[in-house]
Image (cartoon, rainbow, N blue to C red):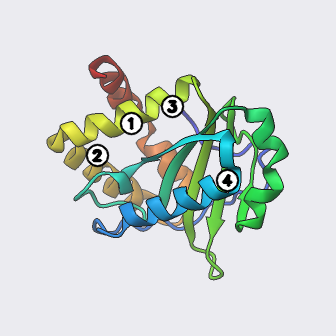
Amino acid sequence: MKYRLSPADQGIIPHAVTIEPYNPDWPSMATHIADQLRSTLKDNLQTVEHIGSTSIPGLSAKPVIDLIPIVKDLSKLDAQQQSIKDLGYQWFGEFGITGRRFCSFTSPTGQRLVHLHFFEKGAANIKRHLAFRDYLLANPQIAKAYEQEKRRAAALHPDDSLAYNDEKAAWVQQHEKDALEWY
């Protein structure tokens, strides 16, 4: 999967890639964000899943909390867009993935802190992300190999997060396939 921008995906610009040692505060940060979303979206929010490298204990990662808030009704979420923006998130719409609503929270200094990947319950991309997360949790040696792949990609593209994602995409796609078979 390529993460290059299309003309419709305005507003996302590449940023520097920093891989940091695992931070034991990441799970509580994810819980705090999930609580904010529950309070804001109320009955439209079914659940929030912590995904990405920050959800894997011991794994070095970009210090960006990735969450999948699963909503009951995507059109209702679209109507709640301003409530998400009021929490400080930028709203990017699908951003290259059909059925997703992507939002990003950036610090005042420009550091990306949170990515929200909203999907409606039953969306196929939910299973893909959860399978990959759970596969890494169950297979520490593969998680460590993923950390090495991320470090390799970051060394090649330290100032371009989109090129970093493209660089590691083949590795991720192969292991997502394995994870889905395992799941």
First reached walking from the N terminus: tag 1 or tag 3:
3
Mark 3 vs mark 4, CA separation in Å: 16 Å
Q: Which mark is residue 172?
A: 1
Q: Which amino acid is tagged 2?
A: Tyr
Mark 3 vs mark 2, CA separation in Å: 20 Å
Q: Does residue 15 show up? A: yes
Mark 4 vs mark 2, foreground winner is 4
Q: Which mark is residue 117?
A: none
Coordinates of residue 111 in the picture (x, y in percent): 57, 73
From the image, tell me which residue sits under label 3. 126
Q: Quadrant of the N terminus?
A: top right
Identify the element where label 3 is drawn.
helix
Most distant residue in the front direction: 43
Q: Which amino acid is tagged 3?
A: Ile
Q: Within 10 angstroms of label 3, few (less than 14), some, or many (20 or more) residues?
A: many
Coordinates of residue 33 in the picture (x, y in percent): 54, 61
Locate residue 8 relative to residue 13 in the image: left or right. right
Locate residue 154 relative to residue 137 in the image: left or right. right
Q: Quadrant of the C terminus?
A: top left
Mark 3 vs mark 2, foreground winner is 3
Identify the element where label 4 is drawn.
strand
Look at the picture and state if 14 lies above or below 123: below
Residue 8: quadrant of the picture: top right
Cβ–Cβ under 8 Å for marks 1 and 2? yes
Q: Which mark is residue 103?
A: 4
Q: Which amino acid is tagged 1?
A: Val
First reached walking from the N terminus: tag 1 or tag 2:
2
Locate residue 50 relative to residue 112 in the image: left or right. left
Residue at image coords 57%, 55%: 115
Mark 1 vs mark 3, foreground winner is 3
Q: Which mark is residue 146?
A: 2
Q: Which amino acid is tagged 4?
A: Cys
